[in-house]
C-alpha cells in the first residue's frame, strides 16, 4: 500500500498554506464571516416548520377545485367475477333429469357508467371551492410575510441582545474601576466604608445584569435557530448611524385604507366568510332532487347444469334515474342550521380582524413617527449623560461629592445607551409591521433592513 503524499506535495506549498488558512478561519469564530440577514432568511425559507406547514396546507386546499369538479364527471366502474359451482341433485321429480352431480364455471363482468345531470350540492361545492382556493392563496402569501417578519425580528433580537450584553459588560467593568478607586481612597483615608459598600452593591447589580444579558443572548440565538434550523453564532451589526424616515404617505388614513384593501389575513378572513356562506347553500342542497343517466353493460358465461346446457348472455341497460329526497330524519335541516351559525362565526372573526388590523396599523404608524423623535432624543440624552458623568467624576476626584452620584450617573448613562440602542431596532421592526399591516411587505423591505447592517 502506497503512503499518502502530504498536502504540500499534492497541492503545492501555496495551496496547502491557503487550505490551512481556510481551516483556521473556520475553526476560529472571531475570523469567521458573519451570517448576513439575507442568508438567514434563505435558511428560514428552506427550514422553518411553520412556513413549510403553511405551504403544505395551501397546496392541500388548492385540491378543492379538482375535487368539486369531479362531481360533474362520470363515474365508471368495472366488476368481474369468476365462480366455480359444484351442484348435486339428490332427488328430482322431473323424469328427464335424474339424480347426480356436476361441476361448472361461471364468468361474468359488468361495466357501469353514471353521468350526473343535475346535482345541486355539486354545483354549490364547485362555487365554494373557488373561494377556498382564494383563501388558501391569501393565507400562503400571508405566511411568506409572516416568515419575513419573524426572521428579521429574530435576527434583530440577537443584535439587540449582543448590544445589551456589550453594554452590561462595559458597565460592570466601569463600576469595577470605581470599586477599586473606592477601596484605594478608603485605605488612604480619603474615602469611607459607606462609599465602598455603595460601590460593591452597585457592582453586584451590574454583574447580575451581565449574567441576565448573557442568558437573553443565548435565548435569542435559539429563537433564530428555531426559524432557520441552524446554529448562527456570528451575525452582522447595526450601523452606528443611518437615516430615519417618516412613513410615506405621512397620513395614517392612507395606510388604513391600504390595509383594508390589501392586508392578506383580512382578505383570507373575507374569503372565509364567502366559504361559510356557500356552505349554507351546499348543505341546503340536500332538499333538491338528483338526476343522473346510467349505462350498465353485463356479460355472463355459465357452464351447463343438470337441468340444461350452459348459456352466454350479453345485456345493456340505459336508464334515467331521478332521486327525490322526501325525509332524512331532519339531517339536512340541522346541517343547514349548523352552517348558518358557522357563517355568523366567520363574520364575527372578520370583524375582529378588521378592528385589530385598524389598531395595529395605527400603532405601527405612531411608533415610527414617535420613534424618529425618540431616537434623536435618546441620542442627545446619551451625550448629556456622558457630560454629567464626566462632571460628577471630576467632582468625586476633587472631593466635592461622594461616589454615589458618580455611580448614579454611570447607571443613567448605560441606561440611556441601552434605550438608544433598542429604539433603533424598534424603529426598523415597526417599519416592517406597518408594511405587513398594509399587506405590502416584501423582500424589498428585507433588503432595506439589510442595508442598515454590516
Image (cartoon, rainbow, N blue to C red):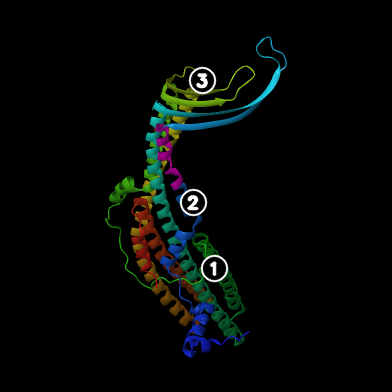
Q: Which residue is mark 3?
A: 328
Q: Position of residue 303 (x, y in %)?
A: 59, 25
Q: In terms of secondary structure, where does tag 1 sit?
A: helix
Work out which residue is located at the far right of the displayed protein and give it.
90
Q: Is residue 61 magenta?
A: yes
Q: Residues within 10 Å of mark 1 (few under 14, many from 20)?
A: many
The reply to whether residue 182 is in sight is yes
Circle number at residue 53: 2
Q: Is residue 425 magenta?
A: no
Q: Do the CB atoms of the residues marked 2 and 3 lie less than 8 Å apart?
A: no
User: Quarter-wise, where is residue 104 in the image?
Assistant: top right
Quadrant, the C terminus: bottom left
279 over 421 or under it: above or below: above
**Nearest the eye: 243 or 330:** 330
Q: Position of residue 37 (x, y in %)?
A: 42, 66
Query: What residue is at 54 percent from the left and 65 percent from the top?
Result: 216
Q: Position of residue 62 (x, y in %)?
A: 42, 44
100 over 423 or under it: above or below: above
Q: In terms of secondary structure, where does tag 2 sit?
A: helix
Query: Label 2, label 1: how many angstroms apart (C-alpha)?
Result: 33 Å
Q: Which residues are magenta?
A: 59-73
205 on left or right of 273: right
Query: Label 2, label 3: how many angstroms apart (C-alpha)?
Result: 39 Å
Sequence-first tag of 2 and 1 = 2
The reply to whether residue 401 is in sight is no
Q: Nearer the viewer, mark 2 or mark 3?
A: 3
Q: Which residue is mark 1?
A: 213
Query: Label 3, label 1: how many angstroms apart (C-alpha)?
Result: 67 Å
**Nearest the eye: 195 or 453:** 453
Q: Nearer the viewer, mark 2 or mark 1?
A: 2
Amino acid at each position: 500500500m502506497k503512503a499518502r503524499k502530504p498536502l504540500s506535495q499534492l497541492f503545492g506549498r501555496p495551496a496547502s498554506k491557503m487550505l490551512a488558512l481556510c481551516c483556521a478561519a473556520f475553526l476560529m469564530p472571531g475570523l469567521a464571516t458573519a451570517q448576513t440577514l439575507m442568508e438567514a432568511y434563505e435558511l428560514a425559507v428552506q427550514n422553518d416548520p411553520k412556513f413549510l406547514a403553511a405551504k403544505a396546507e395551501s397546496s392541500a386546499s388548492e385540491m378543492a377545485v379538482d375535487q368539486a369538479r369531479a362531481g360533474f364527471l362520470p363515474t365508471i366502474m368495472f366488476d368481474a367475477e369468476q365462480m366455480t359451482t359444484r351442484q348435486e341433485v339428490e332427488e328430482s321429480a322431473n323424469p328427464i333429469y335424474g339424480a347426480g352431480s356436476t361441476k361448472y364455471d361461471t364468468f361474468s363482468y359488468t361495466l357501469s357508467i353514471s353521468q350526473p345531470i343535475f346535482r345541486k350540492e355539486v354545483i354549490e361545492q364547485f362555487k365554494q371551492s373557488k373561494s377556498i382556493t382564494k383563501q388558501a392563496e391569501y393565507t400562503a402569501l400571508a405566511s411568506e410575510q409572516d416568515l419575513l417578519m419573524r426572521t428579521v425580528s429574530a435576527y434583530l433580537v440577537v443584535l439587540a441582545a449582543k448590544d445589551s450584553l456589550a453594554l452590561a459588560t462595559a458597565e460592570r467593568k466601569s463600576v469595577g474601576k470605581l470599586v477599586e478607586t473606592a477601596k484605594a481612597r478608603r485605605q488612604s483615608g480619603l474615602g469611607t466604608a459607606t462609599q465602598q459598600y455603595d460601590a460593591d452593591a452597585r457592582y453586584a447589580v451590574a454583574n447580575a445584569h451581565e449574567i441576565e444579558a448573557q442568558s437573553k443572548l443565548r435565548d435569542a440565538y435559539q429563537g433564530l435557530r428555531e426559524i432557520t434550523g441552524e446554529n448562527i453564532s456570528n451575525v452582522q451589526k447595526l450601523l452606528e448611524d443611518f437615516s430615519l424616515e417618516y412613513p410615506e404617505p405621512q397620513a395614517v388614513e392612507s395606510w388604513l385604507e391600504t390595509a383594508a384593501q390589501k392586508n392578506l389575513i383580512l382578505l383570507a378572513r373575507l374569503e372565509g366568510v364567502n366559504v361559510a356562506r356557500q356552505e349554507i347553500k351546499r348543505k341546503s342542497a340536500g332538499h333538491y332532487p338528483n338526476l343522473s343517466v346510467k349505462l350498465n353493460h353485463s356479460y355472463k358465461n355459465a357452464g351447463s347444469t343438470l337441468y340444461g346446457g350452459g348459456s352466454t348472455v350479453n345485456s345493456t341497460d340505459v336508464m334515467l334515474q331521478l332521486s327525490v329526497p322526501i325525509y332524512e330524519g331532519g339531517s339536512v335541516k340541522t346541517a343547514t342550521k349548523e352552517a348558518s351559525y358557522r357563517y355568523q362565526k366567520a363574520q364575527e372573526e372578520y370583524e375582529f380582524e378588521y378592528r385589530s388590523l385598524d389598531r395595529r396599523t395605527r400603532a405601527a404608524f405612531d411608533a415610527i413617527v414617535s420613534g424618529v423623535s425618540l431616537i434623536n432624543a435618546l441620542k442627545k440624552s446619551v451625550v448629556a449623560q456622558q457630560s454629567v458623568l464626566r462632571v460628577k467624576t471630576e467632582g468625586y476626584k476633587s472631593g466635592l461629592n461622594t461616589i454615589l452620584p458618580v455611580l448614579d450617573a454611570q447607571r443613567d448613562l448605560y441606561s440611556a445607551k441601552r434605550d438608544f440602542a433598542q429604539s433603533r431596532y424598534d424603529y426598523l421592526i415597526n417599519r416592517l409591521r406597518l408594511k405587513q399591516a398594509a399587506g405590502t411587505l416584501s423582500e424589498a423591505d428585507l433588503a432595506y433592513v439589510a442595508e442598515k447592517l454590516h
